[in-house]
Protein backbone atom coordinates (compact mmCIF):
# COMPACT_ATOMS: atom_id res chain seq x y z
CA UNK A 1 0.00 0.00 0.00
CA UNK A 2 2.81 2.40 0.90
CA UNK A 3 4.58 1.70 -2.38
CA UNK A 4 1.39 2.31 -4.35
CA UNK A 5 0.80 5.66 -2.61
CA UNK A 6 4.41 6.62 -3.22
CA UNK A 7 4.16 5.82 -6.95
CA UNK A 8 0.85 7.69 -7.25
CA UNK A 9 2.32 10.71 -5.45
CA UNK A 10 5.42 10.59 -7.61
CA UNK A 11 3.43 10.56 -10.86
CA UNK A 12 1.16 13.35 -9.63
CA UNK A 13 4.17 15.47 -8.70
CA UNK A 14 5.84 14.89 -12.05
CA UNK A 15 2.63 15.75 -13.88
CA UNK A 16 2.20 19.07 -12.07
CA UNK A 17 5.88 19.90 -12.47
CA UNK A 18 5.70 19.26 -16.21
CA UNK A 19 2.44 21.18 -16.56
CA UNK A 20 3.89 24.15 -14.71
CA UNK A 21 7.02 24.13 -16.84
CA UNK A 22 4.95 23.94 -20.03
CA UNK A 23 2.79 26.87 -18.98
CA UNK A 24 5.80 29.00 -18.11
CA UNK A 25 7.93 27.96 -21.08
CA UNK A 26 6.82 30.12 -23.99
CA UNK A 27 5.93 33.77 -24.23
CA UNK A 28 2.45 34.63 -25.52
CA UNK A 29 1.99 34.41 -29.29
CA UNK A 30 0.42 37.87 -29.31
CA UNK A 31 2.06 41.16 -28.41
CA UNK A 32 1.21 42.82 -25.11
CA UNK A 33 -0.98 45.94 -25.05
CA UNK A 34 0.73 48.94 -26.63
CA UNK A 35 3.28 46.79 -28.48
CA UNK A 36 3.41 45.59 -32.10
CA UNK A 37 4.57 42.06 -32.93
CA UNK A 38 6.99 42.04 -35.89
CA UNK A 39 8.85 39.51 -38.03
CA UNK A 40 12.41 39.65 -39.43
CA UNK A 41 11.34 41.49 -42.59
CA UNK A 42 9.63 44.22 -40.56
CA UNK A 43 12.68 44.49 -38.26
CA UNK A 44 14.83 45.15 -41.34
CA UNK A 45 12.38 47.81 -42.56
CA UNK A 46 12.26 49.48 -39.16
CA UNK A 47 16.05 49.41 -38.85
CA UNK A 48 16.45 50.95 -42.32
CA UNK A 49 14.06 53.68 -41.17
CA UNK A 50 16.18 54.51 -38.12
CA UNK A 51 14.58 52.39 -35.40
CA UNK A 52 16.69 51.43 -32.40
CA UNK A 53 17.19 47.66 -32.29
CA UNK A 54 17.59 46.44 -28.70
CA UNK A 55 19.08 43.11 -27.65
CA UNK A 56 17.66 42.36 -24.19
CA UNK A 57 19.78 39.26 -23.57
CA UNK A 58 22.66 39.20 -21.09
CA UNK A 59 25.72 41.23 -22.11
CA UNK A 60 27.71 37.99 -22.48
CA UNK A 61 25.17 36.67 -25.00
CA UNK A 62 25.26 39.96 -26.90
CA UNK A 63 29.05 39.63 -27.05
CA UNK A 64 28.72 36.23 -28.72
CA UNK A 65 26.81 37.78 -31.62
CA UNK A 66 23.72 39.84 -32.23
CA UNK A 67 21.68 41.46 -34.96
CA UNK A 68 23.95 43.85 -36.81
CA UNK A 69 23.45 47.38 -35.50
CA UNK A 70 21.68 46.32 -32.30
CA UNK A 71 22.53 47.84 -28.93
CA UNK A 72 22.77 45.86 -25.71
CA UNK A 73 20.26 46.80 -23.00
CA UNK A 74 19.99 43.64 -20.90
CA UNK A 75 16.79 42.84 -19.07
CA UNK A 76 18.85 41.45 -16.25
CA UNK A 77 18.54 40.27 -13.61
CA UNK A 78 15.18 38.76 -14.49
CA UNK A 79 13.68 37.62 -11.19
CA UNK A 80 9.96 38.04 -11.83
CA UNK A 81 7.66 35.22 -12.94
CA UNK A 82 7.85 34.13 -16.57
CA UNK A 83 4.21 34.95 -17.13
CA UNK A 84 2.28 37.65 -19.03
CA UNK A 85 1.49 39.39 -15.73
CA UNK A 86 4.69 39.92 -13.74
CA UNK A 87 6.20 42.29 -11.17
CA UNK A 88 8.71 44.39 -13.14
CA UNK A 89 10.02 45.89 -9.88
CA UNK A 90 11.78 42.58 -9.28
CA UNK A 91 13.76 42.99 -12.50
CA UNK A 92 16.23 45.50 -13.93
CA UNK A 93 15.95 47.20 -17.32
CA UNK A 94 17.95 50.41 -17.91
CA UNK A 95 15.74 52.57 -20.14
CA UNK A 96 18.22 55.48 -19.87
CA UNK A 97 20.17 53.87 -22.74
CA UNK A 98 17.19 54.30 -25.06
CA UNK A 99 16.13 57.27 -27.18
CA UNK A 100 13.06 59.39 -26.44
CA UNK A 101 9.61 57.92 -25.95
CA UNK A 102 8.52 58.74 -29.51
CA UNK A 103 11.38 56.79 -31.11
CA UNK A 104 10.76 53.42 -32.74
CA UNK A 105 12.26 50.67 -30.58
CA UNK A 106 12.48 46.98 -31.50
CA UNK A 107 13.24 44.53 -28.67
CA UNK A 108 14.34 40.91 -29.08
CA UNK A 109 16.10 38.04 -27.34
CA UNK A 110 16.29 34.25 -27.88
CA UNK A 111 12.82 33.49 -29.29
CA UNK A 112 9.61 32.25 -27.70
CA UNK A 113 11.01 30.76 -24.51
CA UNK A 114 13.01 33.93 -23.71
CA UNK A 115 10.89 36.33 -21.69
CA UNK A 116 13.38 39.23 -21.57
CA UNK A 117 12.15 40.94 -24.75
CA UNK A 118 8.49 40.38 -23.88
CA UNK A 119 9.00 41.90 -20.44
CA UNK A 120 11.05 44.81 -21.75
CA UNK A 121 8.30 45.56 -24.30
CA UNK A 122 5.70 45.57 -21.51
CA UNK A 123 7.88 47.86 -19.37
CA UNK A 124 8.52 50.27 -22.25
CA UNK A 125 4.83 50.54 -23.13
CA UNK A 126 3.91 51.00 -19.46
CA UNK A 127 6.44 53.83 -19.23
CA UNK A 128 4.99 55.77 -22.13
CA UNK A 129 7.06 54.59 -25.07
CA UNK A 130 4.73 54.93 -28.05
CA UNK A 131 6.43 52.89 -30.79
CA UNK A 132 7.47 49.58 -29.26
CA UNK A 133 7.98 46.56 -31.50
CA UNK A 134 8.57 43.00 -30.28
CA UNK A 135 10.54 40.60 -32.45
CA UNK A 136 9.42 37.44 -30.66
CA UNK A 137 11.44 35.01 -32.80
CA UNK A 138 14.68 36.85 -32.08
CA UNK A 139 18.23 35.68 -32.68
CA UNK A 140 17.47 32.06 -33.67
CA UNK A 141 15.13 33.21 -36.45
CA UNK A 142 17.52 35.95 -37.58
CA UNK A 143 20.41 33.45 -37.80
CA UNK A 144 18.26 30.86 -39.60
CA UNK A 145 17.46 33.47 -42.25
CA UNK A 146 21.19 34.22 -42.58
CA UNK A 147 20.61 37.90 -41.89
CA UNK A 148 23.51 40.19 -40.85
CA UNK A 149 25.02 39.49 -37.44
CA UNK A 150 27.96 41.09 -35.67
Image (cartoon, rainbow, N blue to C red):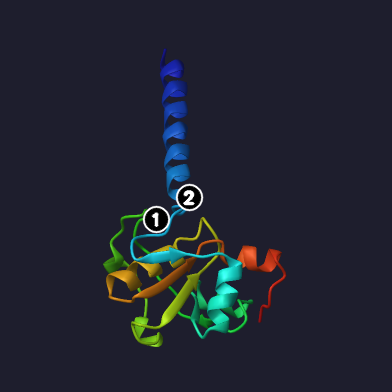
Counting other residues with Cα less than 10 Å from the Cα at mark 1, is it few (<14), some (14-19), or many (20 or more)?
A: many
Label tally:
2
Residue at position x 63%, y 63% in the image: 141
Q: Is residue 147 left or right of residue 85?
A: right
Q: Report whether residue 52 is seen.
A: yes
SS class of the residue under badge 2? helix
With respect to residue 115, does 126 lie above or below? below
Q: In this figure, which residue is indicated by the disc labeled 2?
A: 25
Pick whichever of labels 1 and 2 is earlier in the sequence.
Answer: 2
- Relative image position of residue 46 (x, y in whole percent): 53, 77
With respect to residue 71, does 141 lie above or below? above
- Relative image position of residue 32 (x, y in whole percent): 37, 60
SS class of the residue under badge 1? loop
Quarter residue 138 falls in: bottom right
Image quadrant occupied by the N terminus: top left
Instruction: Tell which residue pokes out farthest to the top in this image.
Output: 1
Q: Which mark is residue 71?
A: none
Residue at position x 39%, y 75% in the image: 131
Q: Is residue 88 left or right of residue 60?
A: left
Task: Identify which residue, 20 or 38, lies in the foreground.
Answer: 38
Q: In this figure, which residue is indicated by the disc labeled 1?
A: 82
Quarter residue 12 falls in: top left
Residue at position x 34%, y 75% in the image: 130
Cα distance in 3D space between marks 1 and 2 = 8 Å
Verify CB contact (< 8 Å) between mark 1 and mark 2: yes
Task: Identify which residue, 19 or 54, lies in the foreground.
Answer: 54
Q: Report whether residue 56 is seen.
A: no
Image quadrant occupied by the C terminus: bottom right
Counting other residues with Cα less than 10 Å from the Cα at mark 2, is it few (<14), some (14-19), or many (20 or more)?
A: some
Residue at position x 41%, y 17% in the image: 2
Amino acid sequence: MKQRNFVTSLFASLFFLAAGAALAADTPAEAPKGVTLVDAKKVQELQAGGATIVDTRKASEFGEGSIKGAISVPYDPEKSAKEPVFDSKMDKFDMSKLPNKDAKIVVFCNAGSCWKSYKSAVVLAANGYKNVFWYREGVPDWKARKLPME
